Amino acid sequence: MDEKYKKWKGVERDKINWAPSVDTKKCNGCGLCVTSCGREVFDFDIQLKKAVVSRPSVYDWLYIL
């Protein structure tokens, strides 16, 4: 890996949890993350009335850098 990509904002990339998540305490159920995520990571759970992470593995490529 090129030296300039080994860190993200001063933190080593392998120390960062890149997996997407939803803070259910902060989620108001607007669905913006579901509709705006270009990688289609999120779905909307109608019963919970919240966004949920359905496909976290689409970000696995970040570990390869």
Image: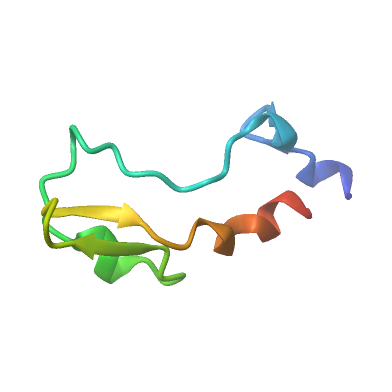
Rendered location of residue 30, percent (x, y): 11, 57
The residue located at (35%, 62%) in the rendering is 42
Q: Quadrant of residue 24?
A: top left
The residue located at (10%, 46%) in the rendering is 28
The residue located at (14%, 51%) in the rendering is 48
Image-based side of 55 in relation to 11, left or right? left
- Tell me which colouring the rendered structure shows: rainbow
Using the image as rendered, state which of residue 4 and residue 40 is in the foreground: 40
Seen as rendered, the residue at the extreme front is 47
Rendered location of residue 62, percent (x, y): 67, 54
Rendered location of residue 36, percent (x, y): 30, 68
Rendered location of residue 5, percent (x, y): 77, 46
Image-based side of 49 in relation to 52, left or right? left
Image-based side of 12 in relation to 45, left or right? right
Q: Quadrant of residue 40?
A: bottom left
The residue located at (65%, 57%) in the rendering is 60
The answer to whether residue 10 is above or below residue 13 is: above
Q: How many marks overall?
A: 0
Using the image as rendered, state which of residue 3 and residue 22 is in the foreground: 22
Q: Quadrant of residue 7?
A: top right
Image-based side of 24 in relation to 55, left or right? left
